[in-house]
Every structure is written in C-alpha cells, then in structure tokens.
Amino acid sequence: CQRPREDVNGVSAVSQTPVRVALLGAGTVGAAVARRLADRAEVFARRVGAPLELTGIAVRDLGRPRDLTGVLPGLLTDDPGALVDEVDIVVEVMGGIQPARGLIERALRAGADVVTANKQLLAQHGVELEALAGREGHGLEYEAAVVAAVPIMRTVRDALAGDEIRSIRGIVNGSTNYILDMVARQGVPFQDAVTQAGDLGYLEADPTEDLEGLDAAAKIVLLARAAWGGEVGMSDVQREGISGLTDADFENARGTGQVIKLIASAWRSGAPGAPRIEVAVRPTLVAADHPFAQTREGTNMVIIEADSAGSLRLSGAGAGGDETASAVLGDLINLARARVAAR
Ligand code: HSE
C-alpha cells in the first residue's frame, strides 16, 4: 500500500502503483477518452497522485477503423468480461442496455468503480445500479450522460446539496435544437432540416430517440433524481417530441415574435411536506429575447431555480467526442483520486 508522498512544496508526489482502468467502447467518445489518457498521462498522474494505466479497450468489432493515435497498441479486445474483473475503474461508453448493464454490475461486484455516459441505461435502470454501487461500496458516476461537457449533474447533486431546487428547465438535446434553429432562423422547411441533421450525423442511430424526445426525457429524469432523489422514471415523463410539428406551427410562432424550442422540465409541485416531482418534455413557445431562444444550433442550456441560489444558467456543448470525454475524464480522475487517497 503506497501513499502519495508530500514533497517540500506540499504537492503530492506520484505514487508508483497505477490505478488500472478498463475502457468499454471505442466509438467517438471512447476513442477520445483513450487518446486523452495517452497524451495527458503525466498531467493526469500528477492530478491523481498515481498513473492511470489503461489495461484494455473492449470493442464489438476489432477490425473497425478508429483513431487511437498515441494509444499503446495491443489494448483492443472483444472480451469485455475478462477486462472488468481486473481493474480499479471501468469506463463504459459502449451505449445500449445490454451488455452494458451486465458489465457494469459485474464490475461493481468485482470491486471496481464505474464511470458511464449511458443515459438510457441510467434512466431505465439507474436506481438499481446506484443501489448496487451503494451496497458494494463503489462509485458510479455519470456526468457525461447529461449535457456532455456541461457540469450539470455535479451542480445539481453536489453544489446545490444545501439548497432547495424548485425547477430545472432546459434545452438538453442538441440535434433537435439544431433542427428547430435551422427552421426558425434560416427559414429551412422543417422536414429538410430533419434530413440535414441526419446527413450531418447529428441524430442518434435511432433518430426517434431525438425526434420523439426520448433522449431529452432520459436526461431530465437523471436531473430530477439528482435534484430530489426518489425514483422518477421514464414512464413519469409527460413527453411530446418535435416530429408532429409542421411548417405552419413555425409560421404561427414567427407571427407572435416567438420561437419553438424542445424544453425538458422538472419541477416540484404539491403541498409543502408532500412535494410531487413532475417531469415533462415538449415543444414550447419561447419569447425571442429569452435565453433559450438565443441558444443556437447544437448548443444546450439549462436554467436551475433554487430557493437560496436563485436562478443559475449553464450552457455549452451537449455532444461531441472530446466534449463528452471531458466529462468522462473528470469523473474518472475524481474516482481515481479517492482510490489513491484511500490506499
Ligand atoms: N442525441 C444527443 C443530442 C446526443 O442530440 O443531444 C448527446 O446526448
């Protein structure tokens, strides 16, 4: 058991025992995580107090081309199960429900902490996964699952833990915001804007995730749980996507000086002492001078109202390889620090 040593300046020297990390998935986000772990190895080692050692990258298709510049060769494997049993921290960025869920459970039971960006898995099974992590005494972190680079989970769950959040409202889906922005500001016909978003690769593999509001619903469910605890689930979301909108709807909005935005909301209602949590995703008319109306293209924005803090606004990139990797790596480094501190 080695502890980080204090040097003369009070800065922790790097302990030699590495924190072992397994990466599940090497798509756009996974490859970005692997590249950063390679090219920022020294910086991360200083921040953690020990090197982060990537022991393997599990992928479905070994032959698929991917950019792993700077990453040690020979790390790719198509056997994720063997990887998760042997490490301190598992990073799951493969997406989908299975095998991701089984691998996360196996990792937690085998003694690892877990970082995941898997919003649908968390929205559907996160309560059970958090309970398992709690029972096993390991961390389960997922900042990247909600609005990627924007540190919204930490803000809601940790920074505002001493306040009372009243509501969270936001544009949390970048591809539908791109579509709505193209129609509102460039006058692109609605269906052409949908096609354009698909051609640019902005839509999920199953476009209904974005267009029917399922992606936004998963994110607002995770935010509601972080704000108020409890077991808010996907079936609690009053959900309407953008697929039913017509060009006439956009004309009408324009005529009244408003724009249509897909707004995800969570708020407290009911009597004091017996609060109810409501969650909704729906196309909403927004005044042209509202910050949501100014949220352009793929940008996301969330506004939190809290009793003491008042109104807080966070915005930024809600998708993208490097942007999502930023949040994944933040969780990874924090979990690794805690591991090193506990040695
Ligand atoms: N489909 C999502 C979006 C990707 O458009 O925001 C990031 O979660």
Image (tube, rainbow, N blue to C red):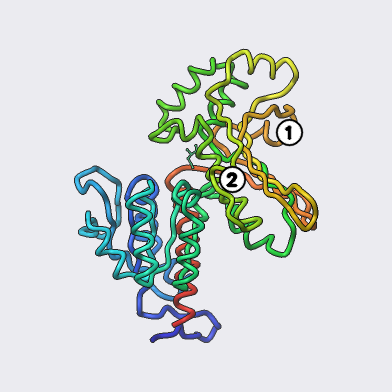
Depth check: give the residue in front, 316 or 254. Answer: 254
Secondary element at tag 2:
helix
Task: Tell which tag, 1 or 2, sits nearer the viewer.
Answer: 2
Secondary element at tag 1:
loop
Give the side of residue 221 with respect to residue 255, left or right: left
Q: Is residue 148 visible?
A: yes
Disc 2 marks which residue?
220
In x, y percent, where is residue 144? 49, 52
In x, y percent, where is residue 98? 34, 50
Residue at point 46%, 46% (across, down): 120
Residue at point 30%, 56% (across, down): 70
Q: Quadrant of residue 87?
A: bottom left
Mark seen at residue 146: none
In x, y percent, where is residue 10? 55, 83
Q: Is residue 46 visible?
A: no
Question: Looking at the image, is 155 positioned above or below residue 217?
Answer: below
**The C terminus sits in image quarter:** bottom left
Question: Looking at the image, is 189 positioned above or below residue 80?
Answer: above
Depth check: give the residue in front, 72 or 145. Answer: 145
In x, y percent, where is residue 51? 38, 72
Total numbered labels:
2
Spatial CA span between label 1 and label 2: 20 Å
Disc 1 marks which residue?
290
**The N terminus sits in image quarter:** bottom left
Q: Quadrant of residue 279?
A: top right
Q: Tell me which amino acid carries mark 1.
A: His
Q: Residues within 10 Å of mark 1 (few under 14, many from 20)?
A: few
Residue at point 63%, 63% (across, down): 158
